[in-house]
Image (cartoon, rainbow, N blue to C red):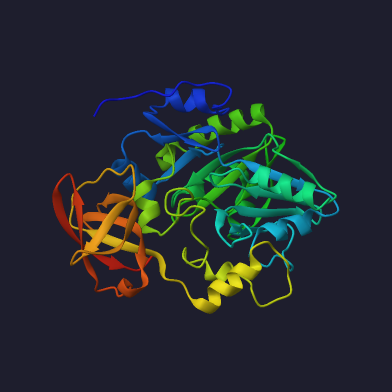
Amino acid sequence: MKKFYISKSRRLRSTPFSSRIEKQGLTAYTIYNHMLLPAAFEGTEKEYFHLKEDVQVWDVAAERQVQIIGKDSAKLVQLMTCRNLSKSKVRRCYYAPIVDEKGKMINDPIILKLNENNWWISLADSDVKLYAQGLASGLKLQVEISEPNVNILAVQGPKSFKLMEKIFGKKITELKFFGFDYFNFKGNKFFIARSGWSKQGGYEIYVENTEEGLNLYDELFLAGKEFNVKPGCPNLIERIESGLLSCGNDFDNDDNPYECGFDQYIDIQSDINYLGKKSLIKIAKEGIKRKLMGVKIDLDKIEMMDELTLQNDKNIIGYLRSAAYSPHFKKVVGIAMIKREYWDKKTAFELEINGKKSKGSVCDLPLV
């Protein structure tokens, strides 16, 4: 396959860690929130095994923050998400789908409550800052909205706990899942959450001081030698097996949170107010006609650029949105939007690629 290159510019920002990861063997970038996001080092499959066995450090600075401060900050944050945040606690993270007035998906960020009047929205790939600014302006809310200079480093994998304990002390191992706190490293405070875009366990470090962050980056690799630390990035195989959805790939603004399987994060019963609530009440009453599910396909490789059609006896059963070869299942696994009448896990289908047909079956998410 012919290689193409992306030209860097002010519209496409690098990260504070770009020069380091490029020297560590980076082979590909993707674009995420108008920034460079590392996409490959040694190859997806090799990195998959390493992530599941050891520890990786990810430059995920492209996971930008929208900071909302002010008297009406909680009101604005709640207006954007269908998750009930009325009982949210300080120093906790909340997975919270953001929806529009039609109840359609805009983003699926992690929302962090720093204090009663200060929130961070840690974004997937879409312009939520503009959405927040539009709502604040139209409703004349007393808030300040900005994108702070925060660049995330993720430390992921089963040995991430030992590595982080070595650097920050035993206290960090006591941090509960989706909790965050401040930890000291060489006299500097780092905001760290027990979170990350893998199911292998780990942390996300919200770097607010670039120079201190670079020093910490170097220390993670020095201290991590005994744990076989390597640079890495979100892994396509691992996240599909784990059922971790990708905004813009697995769902977009044509899909609603019920179709995405986010039922537990949707509140239509209480008196909280958010955009899209009336639409979601109607959707819940009528029921959905499709939803995201897992699929397994009898192939040993696949490359996807656009969604692919899945058929059963010439009937379209759904559309494949993400896929990768899984060494665990020894076949291609994927995430697909499946029509209601084909939700049965015994449903078989055919997929045609370049004139060749392959067989597959529908299954639940997560796959493992």
Quarter occupied by residue 188? top right
User: Which residue is nearer to you in this view: 357 or 325?
Assistant: 357
Query: Can residue 138 be seen in this snapshot?
Result: yes
Residue at the extreme left of the image, as rendered = 356
Measured as percent of width and height from the top left, residue 236 is found at: 37, 47
Return the residue nearer the eye: 11 or 50.
Answer: 11
Q: At 38% from the left edge and 27% from the top edge, which residue is drawn?
A: 25
Q: Is residue 366 visible?
A: no
Image quadrant occupied by the C terminus:
bottom left
Residue toward you, 283 or 6: 283
Number of numbered discs = 0
- Picture coordinates of residue 74, whole percent (x, y): 77, 58
Residue at image position (69%, 32%) is: 209
The one of 321 and 214 positioned closer to us in this rendering: 321
Horizontal relation, residue 259 to residue 281: left or right: left
Where's residue 351, x and y in %? Answer: 21, 56
Horizontal side, residue 136 vs residue 173: left or right: right
Identified at 67% across, 43% down, the residue is 130
Q: Is residue 60 above or below residue 140?
A: above
> Is residue 264 found left or right of 53 in the rendered image?
right
Q: Residue 274 placed where, x, y %?
A: 70, 63
Residue 198 in the image: above or below residue 127 = below
